[in-house]
Image: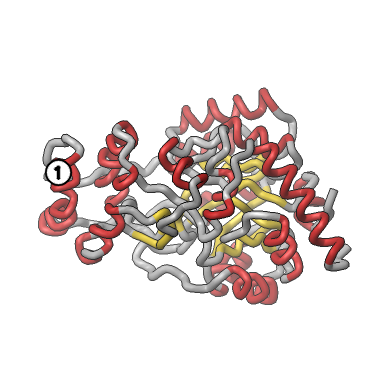
Amino acid sequence: MIRTSLTERLGINYPIIQAPMASATTPAMVVAASEAGALGSLGAAYMAPDEIRAAIQKIRQATKRPFQVNLFAPQKRYTLTDDEIDQANKPLRAIRAELGLADRNSAPEYKDRFANQLQVLLDEEISIMGFHFGLPDAEDLDKVKASGAVLIGCATRVSDAVALDKAGVDFVVAQGFEAGGHQGTFHSEEEPSMIGLMALIPQIVDAVSVPVIGAGGLMDGRGLAAALALGASAGQLGTAFLASPESRAHDVHKKLLLDGAQDGTRVTRAFSGRPARGLVNRMMEEIDALPNQILPFPYQHSLTTEIRSVAGEQKRSDFLSMWAGQGAKMVRDLSTGEIVNALGVELERALKERNYE
């Protein structure tokens, strides 16, 4: 057992958080991570309210350990012109045709389910809530605080971390540029932060009054020890769990990770309209070359949903969003529980070797 302010507050054995990956986490992953002594996290942003409730109940049937549920904060609404929609569709038409999909000219849908998603978390009395892309508005934030839940926010910049601190979060995730998946930038149109985790942690630690969680590129106990040495109270890992049997990542995605992620990773807006890091593929190359034809999140996400779904059915990695961080080459072919156990052993060894205990 390794004690930090976070492990003491949350009642977990290791300062390790399994990241709430919206497209990859499952109840089985959450249970396995929590049972092994980490904080399991359900990424519920893309789930319907009834699906969230069912997942929470499934987790609770399998473990009494703490776990987190994470949502995307409400997104800005945009008024899209017919020309903007047509321009965004143009580079996707050849891809759709290659996958055997009909052409599409309709406007992408905007499904704002946040209010109903949050209500499920409140009804189910979730004790740890996390939010990505900023925080809910003041009214909803007051509801979260009134529930007594521990509140976790994500920042990629010091200024955002300070804003989270002032808003009353209990923990700030310092997400470095190395992180896989979506950057936690507050606004869709913002340029991706270019600050690496080792530089970001001490800056945020010095700027806020609450404990900090390091995230981005952490894959083993050495990285976790480095994050703790810089002042973090825990490390959050996502890519490390992507190839586990409990992960919902596509088998093609898992295989590429286990084969060493030979093409590397890059930040893209091609799939969702927000900066997100993933394994480089053809869709990223083609769509990112036309930045003015990419819609903001979540409209681009809606526009590419069918493409990604059918690409998965056809096992076409060139059109899948395969999120992964810069540490992708270090992915291990282990179960979630085995990964947590290995991380705990490695972290304890690293701390002893450096006399941090």
Residue 90: image location, x then y, percent: 13, 53
When asked about the image quadrant of residue 170, the answer is bottom right
Instruction: Determine whether 356 is above or below 303 in the image.
Output: below
Residue displayed at 54% across by 41% down: 243
Q: Nearer the viewer, residue 292 or 256?
A: 256
Residue 210 seen in the figure: no
Q: Is residue 171 left or right of residue 90?
A: right
Where is residue 12 shown, x and y percent of the image? 77, 45
Q: Is residue 31 above or below residue 197?
A: above
Tell me which residue sits at (38%, 68%) in the image. 190
Q: Nearer the viewer, residue 37 or 113?
A: 37
Q: How many marks?
A: 1
Residue 290 visible to the viewer: yes
Figure check: 81 above or below 127 = below
The residue identified by callout 1 is 106
Where 167 falls versus 139 (above or below)? below
> Which quadrant does the C terminus fall into?
bottom right
Q: Position of residue 255 (x, y in %)?
A: 46, 41
Q: Is residue 346 left or right of residue 101?
A: right
Q: How far from the left and from the top, in percent, is residue 46?
A: 43, 40
Q: Judge by depth and name the residue closer to the eye, 23 or 221.
A: 221
Name the quadrant containing residue 198: bottom right
Q: Residue at x 39, y 54 (%)?
A: 75
Q: Is residue 152 left or right of residue 118?
A: right
Name the element at disc 1. Answer: loop
Q: Residue at x 71, y 61 (%)?
A: 222
Q: What amino acid is at disc 1?
A: Ser
Crowding around mark 1 (Cα neighbors within 10 Å: few <14, some 14 to 19, many 20+) is few
- The color scheme shown is secondary structure
